[in-house]
Amino acid sequence: MSIKIDRLNNTVVEEISQILRTEIKDDRINFVTVTAAKITNDLSFAKIYVTILNDKERDSILKQLNKASNFIERELSKRINIRKMPDITFVYDESIEYATNIENIIESIENNE
């Protein structure tokens, strides 16, 4: 991946986090953290990885975020000057759960030794 795309990914994470904090009026969105963005090289698509504090409402919050993606794209286009605004899709970031699971496995191995 190019340095330009990496820089754009970081900028998108910061700006979407700001948009979710200030522009979205749904209180459940306050418990969403944007962890990463992966934009394709041709700027067509962007996966926005998020974590959600309340696991019980994960699916409904993801649906709400994906419904609001057009609004978020418009707000993002006002803040970032790029030739083409990618289509945004929000995806739950499972890397934290995966890391916690690996940590628990390592602890259980250490306790058994």
Image: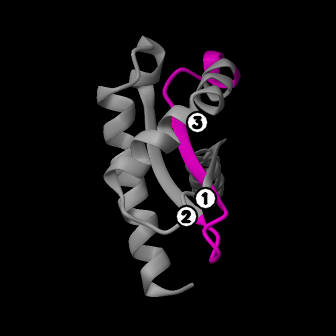
Identify the residue shown where x is 39% and y is 32%: 20
Please tell me which residue lies in front, 107 or 75: 75
Identify the residue shown where x is 70% and y is 24%: 59
Residue 16 marker: none
- Magenta stretch encompasses residue 89: no
Identify the residue shown where x is 32% and y is 51%: 79
Please tell me which residue lies in front, 16 or 70: 70
- Residue 3, percent from left and from top: 43, 85
Q: Of the residues shown, which amino acid type is indicated by label 3? A: Asn
Residue sitting at the far front: 83
With respect to residue 67, does 106 lie above or below?
Answer: below
Q: Which type of secondary structure does the marked residue at label 3 adopt?
A: helix
Which image quarter holds the C terminus?
bottom right
Please tell me which residue lies in front, 108 or 6: 6
Q: Of the residues shown, which amino acid type is indicated by label 2? A: Lys
Disc nearer the start of the sequence (1/2)? 2
